[in-house]
Image (spheres, rainbow, N blue to C red):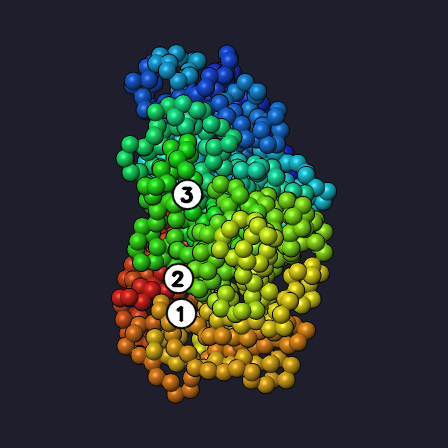
Amino acid sequence: MNSWLHKNNIIFILFCLLFIDVKTDLVAQTQIKAWYAQGQVWIVWEIKDSLPETFAIYASPSTFSNINNANLIGRLFKEEYLPGALKYYVDPMATYRIPNGSGGIYQLKNNEGLFVFTPHQKGSLFFAVVPWGQTNILPNQHITQKAIDFNYDPIKDPVECHVQKTYSTEPGYTTFAYYLWADGRQNYWEARPDFPVMANEAKNGMPSMFLVSASNKVDTTKPIPCSIWLNGGECGPGGNVPGGKKIVNINPKEGLLVTHNDDVFGYILSYLASFEFASHHFGWRKNYDPFSKNNAPNSVDTVINYTQRKYIWVDEWMIRRLHVDPYRININGHSLGSKGATAIAKTYPDHFASATIFDNGFIEDDPPSGIDILFGPTALHFPTNLYNRDGKNIAYTDVMNITDRNATQRDLPLLRVFHAKNDIDSGSKWDDYVVKQFYASDSLGWGTQIYWGERAHGIETGPEHNDHWHNGNTPDLQTHVDDISYEETFIRSNQSFPAFFNHHLDPKNNDPGDGTPGTGPKGVGDDWGCWGGYHRWDQNNILDINDKWSVDAWLESNAVFQNDNSPENSLTADLAVRKPQKFLPFPGRTLEWRVIDLNNGNVLQSGLSQLQADLLVVIPQIIVYKENIRKVKILLEYLTGGTHNESNSFYSNIYINSNESNDESWLNLISNNDSNINIKVIHLSGNEISFMSTIHVGENKISLRPFEHLPQGIYIIELQNNHIRQSLKWVK
C-alpha cells in the first residue's frame, strides 16, 4: 500500500498532487510532441489558427508524409482536445494538466491540444496530428521528430486518473476535478488487464471528467465510504457537489462524494450535440459514428455498457489510491441519473452497498427522437452485452427497471426508490408502469424500499407541493434516509440484510393508486406513502454464521422528521435473507424461525420454512413493531434433526485470506462432499479466467496462484459445480 494513504487527511493527499513540479515545456518548442507516462502516451500539439471542429491523430512505426501511410488512432472534437467539460463546469480558463514523463506535471498552454493513446504492448511509434480532412503531413509541424517509445506493464505501471483543478463549493469541503482518457475498441472484451475498454473505436481517446469531494476533516486512517451521485438532465456534475441538492443533503461526513460528467460529443444526424448529449450513464451502441450526419442505425446493433465500465474502474482506482472502502460504495441518482444508478447497481450488484434513486420511469420508452441514434429505436429493443442469471440477453430498454437482473448474481443491493405523483416529465413520469414496477418489485423479495409523494419531477419542487418526504432543507422538513451521511454508515455490500417485502399485502400500508398523475381530487390512491420505508434494523448486530442467521428489527419512531416515523404500531411483511455471507443452507434443509421480543425474551412468532427457488431463504408474515413499543430479534437456524440432501454439492464458510509476505491468496471453504469444481475469476470489466480444482469433504484451502498475474482490482470469484453456483467478492 502506498505510504501516502496513511495520512490523516485526504484533502492534504489530493492537494499535494496539484503542486508537483509544473513544467511549461519539455524540449525545444516544436508543433507536436509526445511522451509516455503512467500507462499512456501523451500527444500535445500547438493550435495556430482557429479551432477546427475535429483533429485527427495518426500513428506508424516509421515516419510518414501522408495519412495513407499511417493508421488513424483517434479523432477528437474541440470540446475533447481542449478540456471542454472542465471549462464549462469548473473554470473557463482551464487547460489540461498531465504527467510529463519525468515525475512532474506538464500544464498545457491555452493554444495546445491533447490526445491520449493507450498502448496494448510495448513499442515505438511516430504520431501525427492534423485537422480532419488534411492528408499531407509536414515534418517538424504535424509529426513527432522521432518515434516515441512506450512501455506496457499493467501491474507496475498502470493507467491512472489525473487531477486537474481544486476548488471549494461549500465551507469545510474541497472538490477535485479529475480526468481520464478512454481506450476505445470495437472488440470491447480486448481490454488491458488494468483498464477496461470504455468506448468504441470511433471514440478512442475521449476524455472524461469526474469530481471528487470530501470534508476537510475526513479521516483516512481507516478505509472510507464513497457515495456516487449521478446527475439527470437538470444539471451537470457541478450540481452534485457539497452545497448542492440540500433537499437531499448530499454533503458527505465520513467519506467521498463523487459525480461523473456524462457528456458524449457527436452528431445526432445533422445536429452536433455537446454538453446536453449523454450516454445515460450506461454506454452507447457499438457502431455509433459520432462524426457522421447520417448515423442512424440501419440494422440491429448492440448497446455496450462503456460508461458503466468507466464508473466501476474509477471506483477501483479510488480504492487503490484514495483509500475507499470497497464494501461501502453507494450509488444515487435523479431522473436520467436514477436510470443510470439503477442499471449499474443491477449490473454490478456485489459492488454496491445500496442504490437510492429518484424519479426513475423504469423503462426507456421515449417516442422516436434523436437519442435513438445512440441506443437504437426504443420499439426495437436493441440488445446489450449483458446477460441475466438465466443466461438471457438484456435489452437496453430494460436495463433500468427494478424487476429484472442485469447479471448472474442472485441478489441486488438494497434499493431505495423515490417517485412523485405530480411528475409529468416524459422520460420519468408517474404512470401505470411505475406503479406496476412497484408491485412487481415488492413481490420479488429484493427488499426494495418504495416512497412516493406529492412533488413534481424536480426534488427541489417538494415545498411548493407540500411534499411529505422533501418539504425543505432542514432535518425536520426532509427524510434522512436519502442523506449521504445515512448511507455512509447504514449498510455494507459484503453484509447480509433483511429484505422485507410484500408490503402491499398489509392493508395498513398506503396505496399508490393506479398511476394516474396528480394528487388530491386529481389523483388516485394515497398522495404519499411508503412500502418498507419505516423498517429499520441494527446493521452492527446481524448474526450470519454457517447454521444461524438473525437480525434485530423495528419500525422507526424516534426520527427528527416526523414523516419518517411509522404511523402504525406494527406492520407485517415477508422477509428474505439477501446477500448472505455464511448462512447458506443446503438444499433440502428445514429451517426453524422465531420472532423474539427483545424486551423480555418472549417468542412472538415461530414456524418452519423450506428453501425457495434459487436457494432463497424466506419466512412469511413477520410482524415488526415501532421502536418505542418493542424491538424484535428475527432468528433463523437449522431444525435439529432435520433432513437435507447431502448429494448436492454446496459450500459454506467461504472466505479469502492472503499471505502478505509472498502476495499469495487462498480460497477457504467447507464442502459437504468430494467433488470437482470450476473456480472462475471475473473482472468487473467482464473478462474472466478459470481453473478446475478437486474439493474434499470438510475444510479446503485452495491456492489462487493461477490468478497471481492479474493486476490489483475488484474481482468476483465464482464457484460452479453442475447447477450449484456461489460467488464472493475478491479485492486483490
Secondary structure beneath dot 1 equals: loop
Circle 3/circle 1 CB separation < 8 Å: no
Residue drawn at x 42%, y 56% is: 403
Which of the two labelled residues, at mark 1 and mark 2, occupies the earlier sequence position?
Answer: 2
Residue under pointer 2: 410
Above or below 582: residue 520:
above
Amino acid carrying label 1: it is: Leu
Of labels 3 and 1, earlier in sequence is 3
Image location (x, y in percent) of residue 337 = 51, 44
The residue at which mark 3 appears reads as 365
Disc 1 to disc 2, how far (Cα)? 9 Å
* Mark found first going from the N terminus, 3 or 2: 3
Q: Amino acid at mark 2?
A: Arg
Secondary-structure class at tag 2:
loop
Rendered location of residue 564, percent (x, y): 65, 61
| Contact check, label 1 and label 2, Cβ < 8 Å | yes
> Which image quadrant is residue 301 in?
top left
**What residue is drawn where x is 48% and y is 78%?**
636
Q: Residue furthest bottom?
A: 641
Q: Sort mark 1 into few (<14), some (14-19) or many (20+) by Cα contacts within 10 Å.
A: many
The residue lying toward the viewer, choosing from 78 and 404, is: 404
Number of marks in the rendered image: 3
Question: Residue 272 got which mark?
Answer: none
Q: Nearer the viewer, residue 332 or 571?
A: 571
Q: Residues within 10 Å of mark 3 (few under 14, many from 20)?
A: some
Q: Can residue 170 be seen from the camera position used here?
A: yes
Query: What residue is shown with label 1?
Result: 616
Alpha carbon separation for disc pair 3 and 1: 33 Å
Q: Amino acid at mark 3?
A: Asp
Which residue corresponds to the image point at 54% horizontal and 69% vertical from the top-left? Answer: 507
